[in-house]
Image: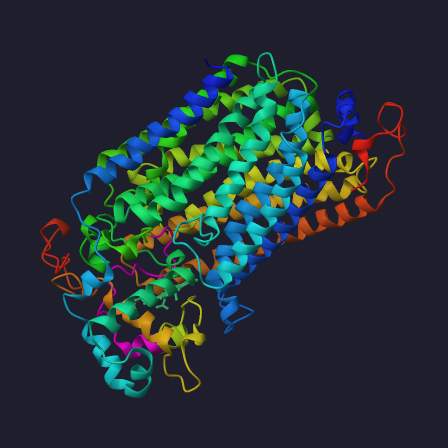
Amino acid sequence: MASQAHAVPASESHEIRGLVDTRIVAFYLVTGLIFLLISMLAGFLFSMQFLQHYPLKGIALFSPGKWRLIHTNGVAYGFIANIFLGMMHWAIPRMTLRPVFDKRLSWFIYVAWQAIVLATVVGLLAGQAQALEWGETPIWVDPVAQLGLILVAINFLPPIIRAPGPMYVTNWYFIAALVWTPLVYAMGSFIPQYFFAGAPAGAIGGMFIHDLVGLFVTPLGWGMMYYSVPILLKKPVWSHGLSLIGFWGLAFFYPLTGIHHFLFSPIPMFLQYGAVISTIAIEFVVTTVIINFFMTLRGSGDMLRSNIPIRWYYVGMVNYFITCLQCSFQTTLTFQKIIHFTDWVVGHAHLVMFGVFGFWLIGFVVQILPRACGKAGWYSNSINEWVFWLTSSSMAVMFVDLMIAGLVQGYQWRDLAPWEASLKASTPFWLVRTVAGTAMIVAQFMFAYNIVKTLAAKPVAAGAAARPAAGGAQPGLAPA
Amino acid sequence: MFESKTGIFLVAGLGFFALAFLVMGLLPWLIYRGEPILTVDDMVQKGIVPEFVELAERFPKQFAQYFGKPDEKSFAAAIRRGHQLYVGEACWHCHSQQVRPVSNETLRWGPVSHAREYQNELQMPVLFGTRRVGPDLAREAGRRTNDWHIAHFFKPRAVAPLSVMPEYTWFFDANGVPNRDGMALITYMQWLGSWLDHYPYYQGEGPAGPGPAEKVNMRGI
């Protein structure tokens, strides 16, 4: 198993030519994971409030609500964005055989992005949140983050645009995501703050919540899958036609779905219907993508056992299918009556953001980090096994737990039970949620330990160790 | 087009996004364009809630220090600050401000929320909310006394033994009197829904107010 991280010896030559800045990849991956740990601890803190045992009661700076904001924003901008940036630094030059637009710009973006995330944390603690879910970044951070996102597009688009010949699927997703992300951010951060009020602001807010997932995280995630999975399985994606359907289906339907976050609201009803229909349509598109990837896996099923990144990726895909299937039901008015505003939605959000994209990103770190740091492999593969099983099983527990909690809450509310009755009924579920979350956090700390130990190992000598002799000095492989 | 750079950049990237924005974003704005977006100063012209005056009477010294006299101007300042705290403390991630026409919500809280109620500067961005750990607050005005809110913000479990709402002790001074922020937040609570002709509404009182939201005559809005 030790060799699984080195399944792509052929591409080493790109590093030699200095196309891939492996250092920045390593920096992004490690920074992203640090933010994941912080965000998870913030989530743990907030969950303790639900058990009436908040450890830091009475301290304004530790107001539970504020740490809830840090939890979600930290995940979105600290964890997910950082690792995706590292991933693009790794994948784009390899696919296009061209460096990014400017390596100094890359480092500038790296530093600026961390400053943006930290400024967001400070702003949130100072009570300056913006009333936009997932986009609570204070209004003075928004223009800076906007600029950062535009710079990211400027840095990554040129190699893709300049590369001749037909584009690989991954790059379709990357182009689209690089265009969409700044647009989505601009739309969400500025329009409902300065131009629209009320229901129209809600329509924009709903689109923002959903587009952030659908037009920023999802396309980068699938782009990453189309990149990594064939490399690890050593075979092409099963059907090019399905790849096309998957991409264009997502591109068309996803942006139309946002209003489903506010059904039965004063947003015009026919638009709510439109959003519901688009959401259900997405489910069909998703099914084609899932079929495509599982047909690709056919014949290599053994890799699920032997290759940890592949396992992260495919379990993430199963979770993706589950969330999308769940989504096509919960978006209907029938389900909305009961589950809206309940923990069902919280479970759904965790399965998407962590069970799918979190899993993929962790899988990517497992696949790439030792190579990006010039190490022979992981310090311990069995720790990585533990991380996988602990994380994925507790994710499953949390999801099912919150889903049932949501139903209980929804029915109690509808039945006009006293509010406190629903709190009482929810408490066991909240306890399970905290326990499952704690297990996830423990797993991530084990992963962190593995990383620290791996980084502490001696770098691979030039031309030696597990990779085929590339010969000579490897400037791109300097230890991080 | 389906695999070309320009196709993906222009059609999928810019085109589909613009289409969705036009249909799902601009259209609702066009539909509600006739509804002016009120400022807080517009809204307080219709009078201040009695609870604000009561705060001034109950804590004359502190109130005078924080807000001066209970008039439209200080009322507006209190609401604005209360809203700011409501957002900054993420109350809106545990409370919604939207009564839906389903699941007996009208029986629990009162009339269904109407688009017009949200056409004001304190709903930029809108505070529909997405999670109800605690109850909806769109009809909170007058449901509880100031004293109840004071006790509740200081120690929610003093009045609701199973509450999981945080203790907001930093909204109080050393003597347990609400400080400026505390008074502002209570004022904001007492204002939410005070624009309706009939309020407060208590659960169990039968059908909500005079009828569906469309027929509700909203004071000032």
Q: Which contiguous range is marked in magenta?
A: B129-150
Report the side of B50 relative to A223 (left or right): left
Q: Quadrant of residue A222?
A: top right
Closer to us: A204 or A377: A204
Q: Which colour scheme is used?
A: rainbow
Report the side of B180 relative to A452 (left or right): left
| Residue depicted at x 29% and y 69% | B77
| Residue depicted at x 39% and y 29% | B17
Q: State yes or no: residue B165 in magenta.
A: no
Q: Is residue A1 visible?
A: no
Residue A428 locus on image (x, y percent): 48, 58
Closer to us: B81 or B87: B81
State the quadrant of the C terminus of chain A: top right
Q: How many labels does the image show?
A: 0
Q: In this view, does A43 lie above or below A463?
A: below
Secondary structure, magenta segment, majority class: loop
| Residue depicted at x 70% and y 19% | A234
Residue A316 locus on image (x, y percent): 58, 34
Q: State yes or no: residue B137 in magenta.
A: yes
Closer to us: B20 or A238: B20
Report the side of A122 relative to A332 (left or right): right
| Residue depicted at x 77% and y 20% | A10
State the quadrant of the N terminus of chain A: top right
